[in-house]
């Protein structure tokens, strides 16, 4: 089993309900156990500003699934909850599930980059992650505490 950290986000179709349903689906994944969930945060949207605020959280999942198998499972959950992928990046969505960290692995594959790209610039990921994994060291050698120093708690509201 490896500890995986997942980012969750939603800004459509009752976002709190979307995250709760996603957490239930994560808890039901085969060969996996939901280990921890951060508080929920409201955050400003990335990209187009003319969309609703997001509700975000981070979950810790202990899993025996391989990274691409987990990615496929996460995308299935997104689709089951009404996610449709559009050409527009960072647009509104019912559910977004991202693999942030996968144990001590560094991955750079066409479908998956771990640690998640641009992790260091996303307060809606870093602050919930720090809540459930204080003092975390990333597989690439960076310290979560150092990333927090350069990413202000802006546009976030603890719910």
Image: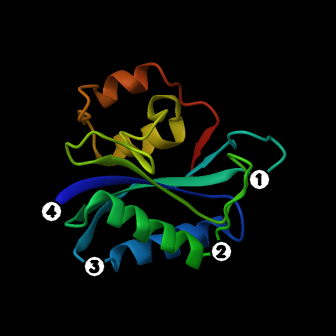
Residue drawn at x 68%, y 67% as measured from the top left? 84
How much space separates mark 2 and mark 4, taking CA atoms?
30 Å
Dot 4 alpha-carbon crowd within 10 angstroms: few under 14, some 14 to 19, many 20 or more:
few
Residues 72 and 11: in front is 72
Write the residue at 35% across / 64% down: 70
Task: Say which element carries label 1.
Answer: loop
Q: Is residue 62 above or below residue 32?
A: above
Whichever of callouts 3 and 4 sits on the residue coming sooner in the sequence is 4
Q: Earlier in the sequence, mark 3 or mark 2?
A: 3
**Residue receiving disc 4:** 1
Where is residue 114, by image quadrant?
top left
* Mark positioned earlier in the residue sequence (2 or 4): 4
Say if mark 2 contacts mark 1, CB within 8 Å: no
**Farthest front residue in view:** 110
Q: Would residue 3 be found to the left or right of residue 94 on screen?
A: left
Q: Residues within 10 Å of mark 3 (few under 14, many from 20)?
A: few
Q: Is residue 156 above or below residue 76?
A: above
Which residue in the protein does label 3 denote? 30
Q: Which residue is mark 2?
A: 82
Q: Residue 99: x, y in percent?
A: 40, 52
Q: Which residue is mark 1?
A: 52
Q: How many numbered tags mark residues here?
A: 4
The residues tagged by marks 3 and 4 sit, at their Cα atoms, a distance apart of: 12 Å
Q: Nearer the viewer, residue 135 or 96?
A: 96
Q: Residue furthest right?
A: 50
């Amino acid at each position: 089993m490896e500890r995986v950290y997942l980012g969750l986000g939603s800004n459509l179709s009752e976002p709190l309900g979307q995250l709760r349903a996603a957490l239930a689906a994560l808890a039901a994944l085969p060969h996996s156990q939901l280990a921890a969930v951060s508080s929920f945060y409201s955050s400003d949207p990335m990209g187009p500003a003319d969309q609703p605020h997001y509700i975000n959280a981070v979950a810790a999942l202990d899993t025996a699934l391989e990274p691409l198998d987990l990615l496929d499972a996460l995308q299935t959950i997104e689709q089951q909850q009404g996610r449709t992928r559009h050409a527009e990046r960072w647009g509104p969505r019912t559910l977004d599930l991202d693999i942030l960290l996968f144990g001590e692995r560094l991955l750079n594959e066409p479908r998956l980059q771990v640690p998640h790209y641009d992790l260091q610039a996303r307060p809606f990921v870093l602050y919930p992650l720090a809540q459930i994994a204080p003092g975390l060291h990333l597989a690439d050698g960076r310290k979560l505490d150092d990333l927090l120093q350069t990413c202000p708690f802006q546009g976030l509201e603890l719910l």
